[in-house]
Amino acid sequence: MTEKQVEISINIRDDMRDERASYLGSIYFITILVGVVIFAILAQMNSNPGRQDGSNASIIWGYAVFGITVVLSFILKKLERTDAASQAYMTGFSVAIGLQLWYIGPNPLFYFLLVIPVGLSALLLEPEDIPWQTGIIITSAVIPAVLRISKGDPLTAVIPPAGLYGVLGFISYFKMLDLRDRILFTIESQSKDSLRAEHFYDQSEELQKALLQVQHYSSRLEILNKQLAEAQQKAESASKAKSTFLSNMSHELRTPLNVIIGYSSSMLNMPQMFENKRINPAHRPYLELIEENGHYLLGLINDTLDLSKIEAGKLDLHREIVSLSDIFRGVMATATGLLKGKPIQLRSNYPDDLPEVWADPMRVRQIILNLMSNAVKFTESGNVTLSAQLAGEFIEISVTDTGIGIPEKALAAIFDRFEQAEKDTDRKFGGTGLGLDISKQLSLMHGGDLTVSSEVGRGSTFTFTLPLAGINAQADDAQFPTSKLVDESSLMLDDGEPQIVLLAEDDIHARRLLRQVLEDAGHVVVDTATGSEALELAEGLLPAVIILDVHLPDANGWQLLKQLRSSGDTQNIPVIMCTADNDVPIDVQNMTSVYYLPKPIIPEAVTGLVMETLSPKAVIPNIESSPEMEKLL
Amino acid sequence: MKILHIEDDMNSARLVEMYVTSTHHEIVTVYNVHEAISVMESDRPDLILLDLVLNGQRDGFSLVRDLRQQGFDLPIIAVTALSTRQDLRECNDVGIDHVLVKPFTIKQLAQVIQTYNVTA
């Protein structure tokens, strides 16, 4: 039962009690009134002198008893003892009538009159009062009869009216009890109905209130919606302002850095700009410090801007279908440039059939490169291994080193901003301490994660996971055209000399496309349609990279590759094999510096791959490309 | 080769000037778009090196857009501290051939100039 229902049922009971009390009160007064009237009629008859065969004292006693009875019952009624009041009244009334009858003598009329208040009194009584009332009826019938008989009246004159009175008394009494039950029942059901009606009324009132509340809320909702729209607009403009701010900050910080790095590097490397005057050797180390710190500052700016962008939610991933092995090759080449003579062996270990992923290639590259450069930074000798494997719905990419390792207590904080394992490591190892934080954030943005396990003195393993599921996602975010503008090859080449790319491709359309793309990227392209010419050109030009079609009219590309590798001059030139199929001969699989360009040719893939084969040493990456490399240089 | 160089930061301008002069190319440096337009009319350059943000305004973009609309088809190289993808995309859209992001080293500048040397 709910609280509400309990309350209602209590209300019903209270109301019924009230109704019932008022009913009993009315019956009580009617009974008294009827009693007084009957008593008055009897008293009038008693004043008839011809009928005086009893004692005067009985008349006086009759008045007295009746008077006392009425007063007593009134008092009891006032004390809200209605039952006791009616019983006292009935008792007193019966005794008073008896006294009157004793005086008057047996008169059937009086007995009839007596029946009326007796019956009425039944309306007042509870069922448990029946024996009491029965006793009163019998007494009020028997006592006068006995008194009359003792006075010498004949039995035949006394018993019939007394018996009739008794019988009628009982009949009227029980009839009235029945009537009383019905009246009370009616009262109860009426009060219940009225309560229900009242309850419904209450409910409809509540409904009305609820309706008003709904109206109130809906208008409030309307206001809130309006406010929300305003807030959204504000947030959008704030977000735009934030973007503009970041862009401007980047611009403003880079401008003076351009002067610092530009002049210091020129003074160090371009004496022709300074009337061929070489700088004083005593000054050189300090100028180098200026340049180095300029680069360090640039790395810091790039990292900070990356982090600000991540935090402002302004760093968007530009996802596309990414071949991880392409990225791995590029990263391995770059990492080689980071070794700087350290006795570290770079290894890679991943299956050829790694599935493609739906990711931002630049960011994936940034993460792996960050892990690789950290590994190289914190390893004095041994190996740094880049490995990848499928693990359920993810690809796990791990970078394992044999470096100094990370103490257990520092592991938890390793991804925190500006944290390095030891507070003094940054002096020795350099770096901003932002790299891992950025990498972690970027991993999370890709739906993956970045975790670490490490043992002091043994080395560390950083594992970066990328979900496979994303590959099915639609390429709904617009792809930024990776045109010559942002291809990193020209930005990242270390020396000013354009790189010669030798291109052996017999299909004229493919050749033209490749030539165009490579030239746009700032390379010098020498092309040929035959294998024999390609070999001659390779010997003569010693190009920076050779792109070989597997199917040339006069030669098998794989054979050509082996011939190139067997000649001392050309054996170290990286070769990009251009092929539509995947069956790489086993003896080629073990060769280093062999790359694969799948057909059909995608211009971006070409420039990217060429860039990676050229083992670039990043000089100035643009902010979006590889900020991690910057601080290492 | 005649190079028109538009750059409002004197220090950066001087650096580029010093380099280009040492390579025996000809360079004219101007500090705003108005000067650039008048130089374009009087003295047709072979290559434009252009800072995109001039005196706090992104005038460089509109200049390139106008030039391309007028049929100028020689290389335009942005030398700029703008570096976001958004900005680079805009460079692509207005018809800039190459972006050299500041800070750059002289070697990079050398390579770019060499690549786009139409007279060579």
Image: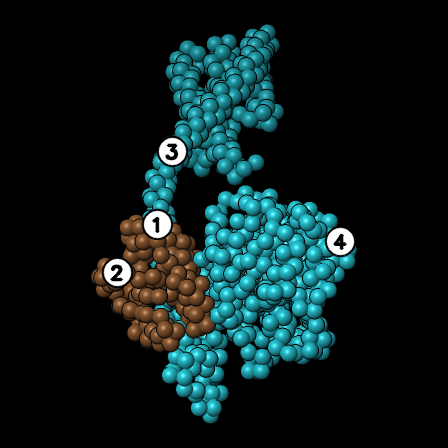
Chain colours: A cyan, B brown
* Helix, strand or loop status at disc 3: helix
- Amino acid type of disc 1? Gln
Asked if labels 2 and 1 share a chain, the reply is: no
Look at mark 1 in the image and give the residue it sits on: A233
Marks 3 and 1 sit apart, C-alpha to C-alpha, by 33 Å
Marks 2 and 1 sit apart, C-alpha to C-alpha, by 43 Å
Marks 4 and 1 sit apart, C-alpha to C-alpha, by 60 Å
User: On the image, which quarter does residue A155 sit in?
Assistant: top right
Left or right position of B95 against A619: left
Point out which mark residue A632 bears.
none
Marks 4 and 2 sit apart, C-alpha to C-alpha, by 58 Å
Look at mark 4 in the image and give the residue it sits on: A585
- Amino acid type of disc 2? Met
Marks 4 and 3, the one that precedes in the sequence: 3
Name the mark nearer the viewer: 3 or 1. Answer: 1
Look at mark 2 in the image and give the residue it sits on: B40
**Residue A231: x and y, percent?**
35, 51
| Chain label for disc 2 | B
Q: Residue at x 41, y 66 (%)?
A: B113
Marks 3 and 1, the one that precedes in the sequence: 3
